[in-house]
Amino acid sequence: MDEGADIPIVECAFILASSANPREFIQRRGRILRRAEGKEKAKIIDIMTTPPQNGSFSEAEYQLERSILTRELRRIRYFASCADNRNEALLAVYDLASKYNLQHVLLGGDK
């Protein structure tokens, strides 16, 4: 769904390997949200990478997972900001963000 794809009729898309690069994920989202005759809305299901939830890990692993999760949460926050189900989307990942002390990322308190 990168440059050159023109698929305005698509009403539902699953994004399985989303980019942390804002230009790329905005471009991908835009491909699905293009207007088309008979299309009122589009649904985007963005699959988020999450750390394993199996218990203990080292400090280095925790910091790596926290870094990955920060990028994922920024993208989720951006996508949610334009969505009809904004609150539902943010609530779905809030507990995970809290576990890594990253609630501020969901609330826009980071850059």
Image (tube, grey):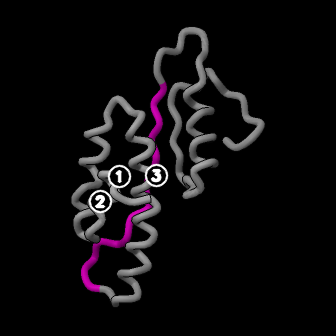
Label 1 and label 2: CA atoms lie apart by 6 Å
Residue 40 in picture, x, y percent from top left: 48, 15
- Circles 1, 2 touching at the beta carbon (< 8 Å): yes
Q: Residues within 10 Å of mark 2 (few under 14, many from 20)?
A: few
Residue carrying label 1: 108
Q: Secondary structure at mark 3?
A: helix
Q: Residues within 10 Å of mark 3 (few under 14, many from 20)?
A: many
Q: Amino acid at mark 2?
A: His
Q: Earlier in the sequence, mark 1 or mark 3?
A: 3
Residue 38, label in figure: none
Residue 92 in picture, x, y percent from top left: 27, 49
Q: Tell me which segment is drawn in magenta.
A: 42-56
Query: Seen in the image, is 16 located left or right of residue 103?
Result: right
Residue 75, label in figure: 3
Q: Tell me: residue 57, above or below residue 103.
A: below
Q: Amino acid at mark 3?
A: Arg
Residue 96 image-quadrant placement:
bottom left
